[in-house]
Image (spheres, rainbow, N blue to C red):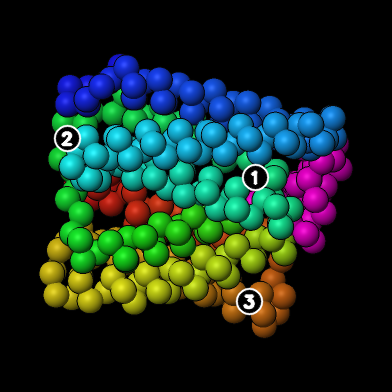
Amino acid sequence: MYHHGKPNNLKMELLASLSIIGYILSTLSIKNMLMQFNQKFTQTLFCIVLLLSIILTSIYTYDLASSHSMQINFAIALLVTSLILNYLFFLFMFTKPIKHLGVILFPLTIGAILLTLFFNFEKEQIKIDNSLILHIVVSIVSYGFLGLAAIQAILLKHQEYKLKNIQNSSLNNVLPSIEKMEKVMFELIILGFILLTLSLLSGSPFVILDGNQNLLQKITFSIIAWVTYSYLLFKKFSSGVRGRQATNLALGGMMFLFIAYLGTKIFFT
C-alpha cells in the first residue's frame, strides 16, 4: 500500500486508518444530528470524535510531509487542504449553522487520506522556499474558507433543484432555510476573499523576482478566481444576486482556485 521511502509504515497506516474511521463516525453522527436523533449525546460524541480525527490526521499529515523533507506534491497538498477545511469547520460549527457541510467534507477528507496511501511519492516534488511560508499559510486558509463556501454552494444547488421540481428530499428537510444557507455562503466567501487578496499581494513579488513558470501559472489562475469572486461580491452588494447565478459563480471561483493550487502540475506538465 505504501510506496518505498515512507518510514514506519505500520504507524502511518494506523494513523490513516483511525482517521478514516473517525471521519466515518463523524459523518454518521452528523446524519443523526440532522435527523434530530438523541441530539445532546450525539453532539457530544460528534465533537469528541471529530476533534480526535483532526488531531490524528494532523499527526499523519505532519509525519507524511516530514518523511519527504517538507516537499509538496498533489496528494500532500490535497490532504493539507482537507485538514485546513476540517479545522475551520470545527472552529465555526459552534457559532454558525454549518454542521451539514460535514456530510460532504468528511467523505472528501477520507478520499484525500486514501489518495496518500496509493500515491506514487517517487514523482517530482516541490521544495518549499522558507520566504514563501507566510504566503502559503494565508493562501491555504483562504482556500479553506472558499472551499467550505463551495460545499455550501453545492448543497444550495441541490436544495434549490428539489424545491423547483417540487421533489421531497430527506436532505432538504434537515438543511437550514435557503436564506440562511446563502447568508453563510457569502460570509465564508467574504472571509476567503479578503485572505485571497492578501495571498495575491504577498505572492506576486516572488513571481516577478523569480520568474518561476509554475508560480506564474498559479498566480494567473488565482487572479482569475479573484476576479470571479470580486464580480460575485459586486453583484451581491449592488443588485442582491442570489440563487443559481450566485452558486455558479462561487463554484466557478473555486474551480479556478483548484487549478491554481492543485491542478497546474496536472494540466500543465
Towards the viewer: 175 or 9: 9
Boundaries of the magenta span:
152-181
Q: Mark 1: which amino acid?
A: Leu
Residues at circles 3 and 2 in contact by the CB criterion of under 8 Å = no
Q: What residue is shown with label 3? A: 235
Residue 77 sits in quarter: top left
Please name the residue that numbered disc 2 is placed on: 123
Q: Label 2 is placed on what type of residue?
A: Lys
Residue 139 appears at what percent x and percent y?
Answer: 39, 62
- How packed mark 3 is, by other alpha carbons closer than 10 Å (few <14, some 14-19, many 20 or more), is some
Res. 153 mark = none
Quadrant of image for the N terminus: top left
x then y, percent, for residue 53 = 52, 33
Q: Is residue 108 visible?
A: no
Residue 98 shown left or right of residue 189 in the figure: right
- Residue indicated by mark 1: 101
Please report whichever mark, 1 or 3, sits nearer to the chain's N-terminal start.
1
Seen from the viewer's position, the closer of residues 199 and 47 is: 47
Q: Earlier in the sequence, mark 3 or mark 2?
A: 2
- Amino acid type at image mark 3: Lys
Estimate the spatial distance between the alpha carbons at disc 3 and disc 2, rounded to whole Å.
43 Å
User: Disc 3 on helix, strand or loop?
Assistant: helix
